[in-house]
Image (cartoon, rainbow, N blue to C red):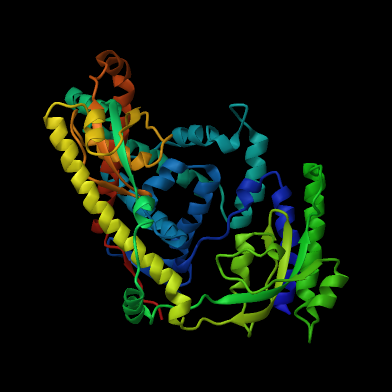
Amino acid sequence: MFNQLLRRYQHPLLVIFTLLIIVSFVGFFDRSGSMDKLGGTHVAKIYGRPVPQAQIARESRKFELARMLGLQDLLMSVIGQPKSEQEAVDNFAWNSLVLRHESEALGINASDDEVLAAIQSLPAFQTNGAFDKTKYAMIFENALQPRGLGKDQLEDLVRDELRLKKIKSLLGASVAPSTAELHAVYNERNQTVVASVVRLKLADFLAKATAPDEDVAKLFETQKGQLKSEEKRRVKVAAFILPTTDKPLEPKERAEALIKLGRAAEEFSIAMTGPNPDFTALATDAQAKVDETPDFGKSEAPAALGAFPAVVAGAFKLSKAQPNSDVLTTDRGYYVLQLAGITETRPLTIEEAKPQLVAQIQRERAQETLTLQATEIRNKIEAELKAGKSFTDASIAAGTKAEVFGSFSQATPKFDQPDAREIMVAAFDLKQGTLSAFTPTAAGGDLIYVDQRPPIDESKFATEKGTLEANLSQLSTEALFAEWLKLRRADARVTLAKQN
């Protein structure tokens, strides 16, 4: 009964939330996470002292508040590089405690006046660049209080960010880059490279590659344990989607139509939980578009599924034990699926596997031939270059043709030609008048030659030096703070309580 009620009201509630003016503040879920579920009086120790469960739960909820208020500097600085949402919440909670402890040890704090000014300057509480008491009250009442967050938590959070800025300022005072360092970085970023390229296409070698039957048979014997057919599904489809029209609906009309379709889809989905439901009859009664797909694989998108990858993925979550899907949402409407059949994987026969085995052998042999010929061509071009020929003439003498790639730098990359990324990466490390090693690409491979490396414009460096210095100082400060926090966190000796 609970599942039916949840499915009945889930969609209408989501629609209502999206219409609220403070949607950006009420869309987050409670992230107190695993630390709020460890049970017991204390969930961990830090600096050798026990931490009550309620305290760490409050710290975790501040993560949500920081996101609501857009405190990106605090968030990004204390969460580190998490691998999951939960790890981000955990890092935020524990590292906030560490930051607070270390700030007190350093005598760093923020006055009440600083906190008040910082709160009033938050974009979330402003209208036309000025503090808006009405907006503050609305957000406070509708977004903060329902989550157990109040004035104290808001002030604590802002105070933490002010402490963070003061610590970074202290660390940043010791990392000002020298003029030589600035010049080196500027040169690396703005050094223009003018390059040419000789392209070798794998397709030219594939056309000549062979795969005799005896080689196919040998490869089949070594790989037959992994050669299997693709699992396929067949599903019945109830589509609650917007009709195709010549004139797009107005936004309001479209939203209203989607709400109506969503309600119908939810009603149908709930009806499918009843005893012995008839999918086709119920879908027809619900005025859905009813269809059944042919067998299809994960990489396919049958027309009946609207070519939506998410709906295809939903079909492969169905099983004989759970044959009916939940409502699957797309930008055109909603789908509900019922499993109609499964084609299980099975070992392929040699005849079935032959096309892919032939393709594998041909590609491997074409790649070998390509690599060998590329080495020969490169050696010939190198010899011609040493004899004084230009790269263009040397390429012709080697039986190939050079193409002009053009000029680029790290600051102004060039992506208007094939293999652009590989060519630029190879060319950046080459001196003027030198030829790269053979550089493999998806289409084959390239030989890259650097025609010119023009001198840096020193007047531009003088103009941009100040901005570059500020950016480098900030990057250095961020890196230094991350290392500082890592060491301070280790000194804090955070020890989580064992879970049952």
Q: How many marks?
A: 0
The answer to whether residue 90 is visible is yes
- Report the quarter where the N terminus lies: bottom right
Residue 262, above or below 323: above
> Which residue is located at x 70 percent, y 43 percent?
21
Q: Position of residue 242 (x, y in %)?
A: 79, 54
- In the displayed structure image, the side of residue 232 where residue 94 appears, left or right: left
Q: Quadrant of residue 252?
A: top right
> Which residue is located at x 47 percent, y 62 percent?
57
Residue 335, above or below 225: above
Residue in the foreground of this view, choosing between 9 and 50: 9
- In the displayed structure image, the side of residue 206 where residue 450 appears, left or right: left
- In the displayed structure image, the side of residue 386 where residue 430 appears, left or right: right
Q: Quadrant of residue 163?
A: top left
Q: Position of residue 47 (x, y in %)?
A: 28, 60
Q: Position of residue 295 (x, y in %)?
A: 64, 74
- Report the quarter where the C terminus lies: bottom left
Q: Position of residue 491 (x, y in %)?
A: 23, 57
> Which residue is located at x 56 percent, y 53 percent?
149
Residue 250, above or below 94: above
The answer to whether residue 185 is visible is no
Q: Residue furthest top?
A: 459
